[in-house]
Image: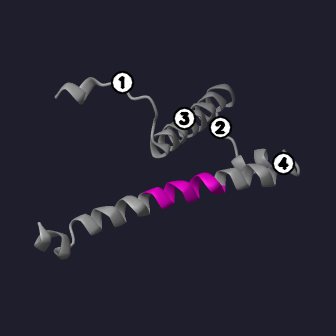
Amino acid sequence: MENLFARQDDWDLGTIFWYAVVVWFSSSLLSQALYMALYGVPYDAVVLLKQFGPAYYVVFAIELFIWIGIGSLVVMKFVRKLSSTSPQSMSTA
């Protein structure tokens, strides 16, 4: 019980990644809300990204990397959950 409130000196990479995902999603949501408040219609993300010119591919690659990271974390959690509830782990317990 005494370790419940112990100071954590370093964060897991997964924790940092999830914070980054939440910040990214929230900023996207807020920017869309602000644009709709100003202009009354949602913006077209494809048109905005194409206005970046060649940097469009960099932005697309970053977003693709984020989605691959989210997918791999979900798959890893699912595999860990499956392996911890497998019949082999239950018979050895």
Magenta residues, start to end: 64-73
13 horizontally vs 66: left or right: left
Residue drawn at 45 percent across, 36 percent down: 11
Residue 7 horizontal/vertical position (percent)? 36, 24
What residue is shown with label 1?
7
Q: Gap in Å between the C-alphas at discs 3 and 4?
A: 22 Å
15 horizontally vs 27: left or right: left
Q: Nearer the viewer, mark 3 or mark 2?
A: 3
7 horizontally vs 91: left or right: right
Q: Which mark is residue 22?
A: none
Residue 50 horizontal/vertical position (percent)? 82, 50
Q: Which mark is residue 41?
A: 2
Kind of residue at disc 4: Ala
Kind of residue at disc 2: Val
Is 89 a magenta residue? no
Asked whether the beta carbons under mark 3 and mark 2 sit within 8 Å of each other, the answer is no
What residue is shown with label 3?
23
Q: Main secondary structure of the magenta part?
A: helix
Residue drawn at 52 percent across, 43 percent down: 17
Element under label 3?
A: helix
Element under label 2?
A: loop
Q: Which mark is residue 55?
A: 4
Asked whether the beta carbons under mark 3 and mark 4 sit within 8 Å of each other, the answer is no
Residue 68 horizontal/vertical position (percent)? 57, 59
